[in-house]
Image (tube, rainbow, N blue to C red):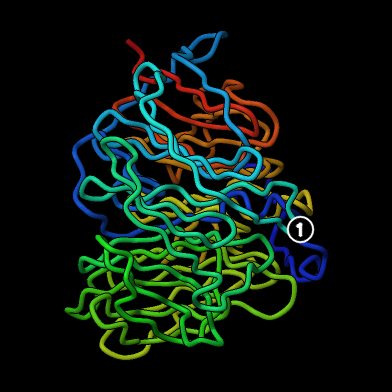
Amino acid sequence: MKDSTQGNRRLAAAGTRRLNWAAAAILCLTLGTAPSAVAGDWPQILGPNRNGIAQGETIAHNWGAAGPRRVWQYDLGSGLAGPAVVDGKLIIFYRVGNEDVAEALDARSGTPLWKVTFPTRYVSTISTDNGPRCVPTVHAGHVYLMGGGGQLHCVKLADGAKVWSRDCARDFNAPDGYFGFGSSPIVAADRLLVNVGGGSAEAGIVAFDLKTGRTLWQATGELASYSSPVTARIADKDQVVFVTRYQTLGIDPASGRVWWKLPFGQRGPTVNAANPLVLGDHLFLTASYGIGAVYARLGQNEPQEVWSSDNVLSSQYTTPIYRDGYLYGIDGRHDVGIASLRCIDPKTGNVVWNQDGFGKASLLLAGDKLLVQTTGGELRVVAASPEGYRLLASATVCGEGTFALAALSDGYYYVRDGERLRCFDLRGN
């Protein structure tokens, strides 16, 4: 290892500690093939392909001492859900009082365009934040929203008109879990798929009609996680990969048939929050709390484990970024106070380099640059290179408690903390 490596360590001893509410913050992370989007759009969690990669985006990092230019800011209520950006509209989901609020802003100016509200009674048993956790999913002129209490809504992108709503907690007897509902819905096979977690009702995974919200199928007795599903083509089958509370599943989106299972997770005060990464014909999974990482080969039958370890890249909630054969991610936990930025080789399980004392953060990729947003509000631009840690620029862009996932669209960077949503120009013009 390079750069302040402390060597291999296990986090299992800390896994029995009370879960910190910050672990809920980045509940919705992932990779896969998304619904088609216009260039520059950021229509769902972690971008067009749910992998944190901003396609065709280039950013400048010669900000100077003042940092990147802030274009606008907008006051919000509570919540941990990051924004989506489609057709020049930014969609943000938050809570004020006893209402969840979905609002559209002009992405370039921050001007409000429409607002729609939904009643909510959700109260988290652990987190101090009772707002929504999930990034909106935008598809074919509609916006799909999941509230912290399990209320699923569909509104029109054009004007926010309500189309339908479902109460997943009530309809499928689904428990809140540690931090409420936090797995972002995904569109596949003309259906909206959700890790509802209604295990007792055999409604672990549920498919809804996009236009009406009608239940099309429900399958498995799996409990919910905070990982968001991804689409993939595996063994000549279109599949949606779900990480649930204790399993990873390959699901036929049309019928709900389970093609394969891979155990992942463990009982106790643990969380599966990072999203699955389908890397060609392999699968990468990661979690903290003594669970660790798994790299498995995908094929016609059950996945075959290549390696597993709690000493490589054990992420509490950050989905790693893949570039040119290497993964970049955060190893460690927010609540324990031990976290480092790492580059690993997923094929071998080797740690290529490690930057200790980095702290918890979420990651996006633009070209050959990692945008690393720390929970303390600092944006760092780091070279996405296996040659070692190289900081290119840094600036404070938000306040303490910046847990929500950011969005990057046409060179503009959108990020929220506990109070405000901000837009920064990273084009460098």
Q: Find residue 336 and report its image quarter.
A: bottom right
Disc tally is 1
Q: Is residue 45 left or right of residue 234?
A: right
In this rendering, is residue 184 above or below 290? above
- Horizontally, is 294 left or right of 356 in the view? left
User: Which of 417 and 75 lies nearest the eye of the viewer?
Assistant: 75
**Which residue is nearer to you in this view: 4 or 407?**
407
Give the x, y percent position of residue 349.
Answer: 50, 67
Q: Residue at x 54, y 66 (%)?
A: 286
Q: Position of residue 313 (x, y in %)?
A: 57, 60
For the point 41% across and 36% down, which residue is it? Answer: 407
The correct choice, above or below, for 320 with respect to 113 in the image is: below
The quadrant of the picture occupied by the C terminus is top left
User: In the rendered image, which quarter is residue 239 located in?
Assistant: bottom left
Residue that carries the numbered disc 1 in the rendered image: 126
* Of residues 339 and 73, the one drawn nearer to the viewer in this rendering: 73
* Position of residue 307 measured from the top left corner of the image (x, y, whole percent): 50, 77
Neighbour tally class for label 1: few under 14, some 14-19, many 20 plus, Cα within 10 Å = some
Q: Residue at the spot x=29%, y=27% of the render?
A: 410
Q: Above or below — where is 351 with respect to 235? A: above
Amino acid carrying mark 1 in the image: Ile
Disc 1 is placed on an element classified as loop
Q: Position of residue 148 (x, y in %)?
A: 58, 56
